[in-house]
Amino acid sequence: MLREFILPDLGEGLHEATLVSWKVKEGDIVQADQPLAEVETDKATAELPSPFSGRIVKLHFRAGERVPVGAVLVTFDVAEAGMAAATPAGPAPTAAQASGTKPSPSATPRTVAAATPSRPDGQRAAGEARPILAAPITRKIAREHGIDLAEVPGTGPGGRITTEDVLAYIAARQGGRRPVAAPVQETAVEATPPTAVAAAPAAVAPPATGVARPPLPDFAHWGPVERQPASAIRMRIAERMTLASLLPATVTHADEADITLLEQARAQAKTLAESQGVRLTLLPYVVKAVVAALKRWPLFNASYDEQRHEIIVKKYYHIGIAVDTPQGLLVPVVRDADRKTVLQLAQEMAHLAERARQGKLSAEEMRGGSFTITNIGSLGGTFFTPIINWPEVAILGLGRIQERWTLAADKPALRKVLPLCLSFDHRLLDGADAARFVNDLRQFLENPATLLLFS
């Protein structure tokens, strides 16, 4: 019998994905969970597994095309016995679909109604018509932990089951100990948005300014030009930067920290770290210092709800680390940084940075940050104005470490100085708040022993 695999709802807010490449071709025999295609959505590259075992009858899109959520990607010829759908599927394709005609944008995702028993692989039990709404990355984690998604309460829109829901369920089952999701190759966009079946998502509408956006001039009038399509990642970055420039009232406070003692401590610990297979950089120490400062000044670990006129103070410390990648600037999040050692932070940040450069980050790995750190020191530059990663209210920028001669105990000494650039949302935080925060941060960095008292 013929079965269809539609592009699943990969997260909240996305309306389409770009098909990067097919990993199969028409006529191939595939097994369930075998990779079918790689798609690019938002800030993540997702590998889509096959929901069926069977022969591929039709691939409905070509590499490079944009696919709306709910559109038919693949038509399978599957055996009737023992086949269970892993994603919403529907009846056999229409004549237009079987002939390769693109699906109508008004098409809607179909629900699962397979008469198969409940399995611990993210499938719904028999007889339930309502589909399980969950991204591939969420289903992957559920399968790895033997969780039946039909038993997990969904807190997302429309009852969507998020990765956080699955992790909370696992933690409750294990007596409150929260598990750490294992890295997976099958990344997917979960809540930094999925797609609807209509046209491409509209860009974020900026607040009204009273000035209409003028059309671009005809640049070809002055010389040769080349138009290049923006990738899904670049479009998302542009959208986020528009939000960051229009919503927060951004001000930057700059200072310097003498990190001579900290660099000496890092040099002493470097050999031990390398014996554990960890490359120890300055950044994990900065994260520990930032967390210590956030605990003293919690408004920097907050968000501002304009609609309800409320300040949302977060009781967790999830630190975003900006990573320069060939695809653009990505910000994976180190969760619960306050509960991790310097070595653990160094190892996790190196892993996330490598996944970011390879385009293997999932959107879930870039969600939920409460404060962000960006570092341009390795590229050069001293002071700059980092852009706030909205809806956060502050971001710390690190410049290039410089060596300077200064007087210490009336004697000249060569010291290492780190530029600190704190951009903050002036709607919520005042200049004096920023100065106090940076003063404490500087003290933690200049006196690393104090970090043991506050981190």
Image: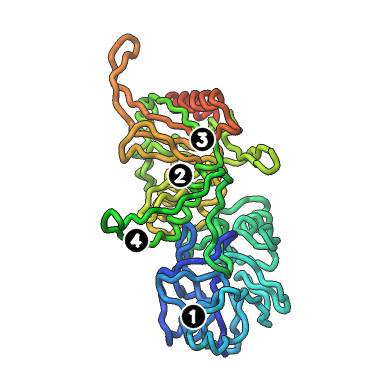
Provide the residue designation for mark 4.
227
Q: In this view, does 113 lie to the left or right of 225?
A: right
Q: Which amino acid does label 4 sit on?
A: Arg
Asked if residue 74 is positioned above or below residue 269 in the image, the reply reads below
> To which residue does mark 3 refer?
250
Question: Which residue does the image show at 48% across and 62% down from the upper left?
Answer: 41
Q: Name the residue under label 1.
A: 31
The residue at the far top in this view is 410
Disc 2 packing (10 Å; few <14; some 14–19; many ≥20): many
Mark 3 or mark 2, whichever is nearer to me = 3
- Identify the amino acid type marked 3: Thr
For marks 4 and 1, the one nearer the N-term is: 1
Q: Which of 82 and 220 is in front in this view?
A: 220
Q: Is mark 3 on a helix, strand or loop?
A: strand
Q: Residue 184 carries which label?
A: none
- Kindly report the distance in space between the C-alpha atoms of the residues bearing marks 1 and 2: 38 Å
Question: Residue 133: x, y in percent?
Answer: 64, 67
Disc 1 marks a residue whose amino acid type is Gln
